[in-house]
Image (spheres, grey):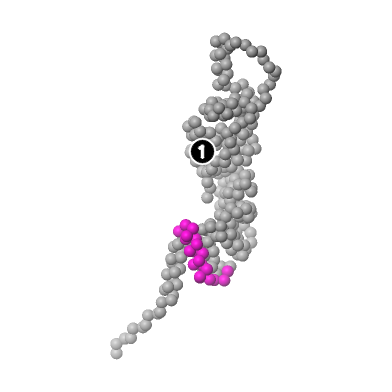
Amino acid sequence: MLTFRLLLIGTTLSLLPACGGPTAATVPDDAAKAAAAKDADSCSAPKDCYNKAALALQAKDNVKAMKFLPGACDHDSKACVIAAEILAQGKGLPVDVPKAADFYKRGCDGGILVACANEASMRYSGEGGVTVDKNRARALFEKTCGPEMLDNCHNAATMMQSGEGGPEDKTKARSLFDMACSGAYLQACVAGGAMYLGGLGGGEDKAKAKSQFEKACDGKTADGCFNLGVLYGSGNGVTKDLDKSQQYFQKGCELGNKKSCETLDQLKADLEKAKAPAPKPIKGKK
């Protein structure tokens, strides 16, 4: 249902102009060199951290960049996301998914939706030891639901339908499934179609259910084909048609839906059994 993913925004930061005017060139003594070396590994303010992180990233030195990115994060939320990506993927440092999730949270709080999306997946799945927080995950899935992240519309709707991570809200779930389905996130067509078929979250609409299953099946989503097979096999909202039922089960089977394969086999067996002539009664002896 829900998948962990990374949505990269690129590990680059642009240098900011330095404060103050030019300084006179001097020849450093040993004390000055030591001070410069110490200064090279620390930063004094968020803007300074940001610039030093930018230089380290440009030099492809992620180890050094991570010394400055936490402070840079206070200056620009993009730095939070870069730090999260480095830690989540182990780019030059050991993987630390819980810390990555915390950086994504800072990026999300700073208004970067891609950070919210990544944190949502992590908080839901607990990937890599991240503290699970279904309530926050659901809120973030809903927050990031939109044309660019239709899967998160589906994720939020799935949680709302079942009451996971908050109160059950089938009406809103159906609305979000509709949004994702209209944007061609086809698994949402299957889930939304089932809600229309059962009258969940609103009035029953079997024609709409059939339409959404067809859209999913035409897009090679096996569950949609299976559901159409069930509709035609039972005559639920459509004229019963066992030939069509078999065709949809066959397509679902070919697309990898095991239940379609099993149902198709059972349906064929039942039809063969129905065609077989009834056994002649055995005459008793006189």
Residue at point 63% right, 33% down? 77
**What's the magenta region?**
238-258
* Front-most of residues 39 and 70: 39
Q: Amino acid at mark 1?
A: Val
Q: Indicate the quadrant where residue 133 lies.
A: top right
Residue 193: quadrant of the picture: bottom right
Quadrant of the image containing the C terminus: bottom left
Asked whether residue 244 is drawn in magenta, I would say yes
Question: On screen, 270 above or below 225?
Answer: below
Secondary-structure class at tag 1: loop
Measured along the vertical axis of the image, is residue 25 above or below residue 5?
Answer: above
**Residue found 54% across the figure and 29% down from its top:** 60
Give x and y (percent) for residue 187.
Answer: 56, 54
Instruction: Give the residue drawn at x 51%, y 58%.
Output: 222
Please identify the residue farthest to the left as the structure is shown: 285
Q: Is residue 12 left or right of residue 265?
A: right
Instruction: Examine the residues drawn in magenta and state their main secondary structure.
Output: helix
In the depicted structure, whether residue 245 falls above or below residue 92: below
Label 1 sits on residue: 130
Q: In this view, which residue lies farthest toward the bottom?
A: 286
